[in-house]
Amino acid sequence: MEHLDLSPIARVSGSILLPGSKSISNRTLLLAALAEGVTEVKALLASDDTGHMLEALKNLGVQWEQHGASRDYRVHGAGGAFPVKTGDLFLGNAGTAFRPLTAVLALCQGDYRLSGVPRMHERPIGDLVDGLRQLGADIRYLGNEGFPPLAIKPARSFPLPNPLPPTGEGTKTPSPACGGGPGRGQVKIRGNVSSQFLTALLMAAPLAGQDVSIEVIGELISKPYIEITLNLMRRFGVEVERQGWQVFTIRAGQKYTSPGEIHVEGDASSASYFLAAGAIGMGPVRVEGVGRTSIQGDVRFAEALEQMGARIEMGDNWIESSGTGRLRAIDLDCNHIPDAAMTLAVAALFADGTTTLRNIASWRVKETDRIAAMATELRKVGATVEEGPDYIKVTPPHASRLTPHAQIDTYDDHRMAMCFALVSLGGVPVRINDPQCVAKTFPDYFKSLQSIAQNA
């Protein structure tokens, strides 16, 4: 296995221009592909995940061009129906591609197969499939029940028994945008497994050719990611009515239309590593590309760092952190920052007591079981760790003396690799196994970290 040996870092300072947001990038690509018109997508993330989405869209007949060597793309929208009605799509471990494409293709009256890497075939998708079947979708499991890979057939057609009431005069019920017959129009889905399931249903709903109401059963996790979805759907001309976080309604007659040009924000989850580095390594460290105007919930990671004792400054498009000495332990509900919360688990190594991160059950169905993986690797550097179904407690080693030369396994999970690189700020060398897994979202991560490092 390839590895990367990181030398101890004495302190950090400088600025980082963030790569584009993965969540925004793949949502934007799919909405641009479904829209009428041509969309100029600026500063798209260069990563494995976006590469899988771009390749899938090409295979589905969507034309796009990259502007030279830049991260700017022109996407020619298909106007709601992908031209290619058969396809065998490989989507790696890209949940932000696999889940929404499953939903869209289920309503497009085609014959498709979707697969990924072995870990993707271990990530549950049953709740999304059940929801789509309530709309008449014909989806079959090709392996284990409730998990990819999937086969999608043309949707079944049957009358709508309980149409939703119109919101005003002139409401129309058009024929389905993708050629399928109407389903029941009312979907119930659990909210406590993955917010990507609700995102997928929301993005696909305008293709159903009828009013669609989605009811979330139980607590909805990762609400900020749904905010991103609603914001981008609005940018592409589709409004979603909602009753709190329990019922979402997409009225018939709406269609995606290109906004002309859209800029992808810097990735707020990726910002967390550098902001934490500033808090641990004294800084200041500034990240550029996200700030107080961001639509990403993970910008609130900065608030958690403040609770731990870091100094935070913020502008419209930048955030800066610096340390004040020893960090304070915190007890935090992390439902609003599920991805960035991983960085807090490593920052806890530098805190003055036991840090508890709660409401993180979604970690278990990500690229790996992140609660188990985080606990295992934190123990390698000397931490005492308690893990539960939806929480983790991290106590630093005695006198904060981290174990040197720990060999960190990354489980083909980009965030594990990026988080544990911060161990080098504890004055010890650390080995990161399979460092290339960061290509999923941030291929130049280690180079960027070294650009702000002052080695001991």
Image (cartoon, rainbow, N blue to C red):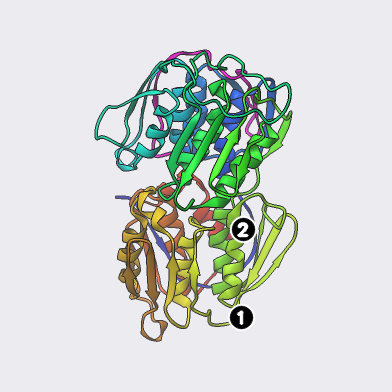
Question: The disc labelled 1 sits on which kind of residue?
Answer: Thr
Residue appearing at x 41%, y 23% in the figure: 137
Please name the residue shown 40% across and 25% down the image. 89
In three-dimensional space, the C-alpha distance between marks 2 and 1, rounded to whole angstroms, equals: 20 Å
Q: Quadrant of residue 129?
A: top left
Q: Residue furthest left?
A: 144
Above or below for 125 versus 418:
above
Q: Amino acid at mark 2?
A: Val
Indicate the position of residue 226 as horizontal and vertical percent values: 56, 45
Give the prevailing secondary structure in the magenta stretch: loop
Mark 1 residue crowding within 10 angstroms, few (<14) / some (14–19) / many (20+): some
- Label 2, secondary structure: give it: helix
Question: Which residue is label 1 attached to?
Answer: 324
* Viewer-closest of 30 and 324: 30
Q: Position of residue 282 (x, y in %)?
A: 60, 75
Q: Nearer the viewer, residue 94 or 295?
A: 295
Residue identifier under label 2: 299
Q: Which mark is residue 214?
A: none
Residue at the far bottom in the pictured view: 399
Give the side of residue 128 with respect to residue 277, left or right.
Answer: left
Lower sequence index among marks 2 and 1: 2
* Residue 357, visible in the rendered structure: yes
Residue found at x 35% / y 33%: 116
Q: On screen, 100 above or below 290?
A: above
Quadrant in the rendering for residue 237: top right
Q: Is residue 27 left or right of residue 350?
A: right
Q: Which element carries disc 1, helix, strand or loop?
A: loop
Q: Which residues are magenta?
A: 65-94
Q: Position of residue 318 (x, y in %)?
A: 70, 58
| Horizontal relation, residue 79 to residue 371: left or right | right
Q: Is residue 391 magenta?
A: no
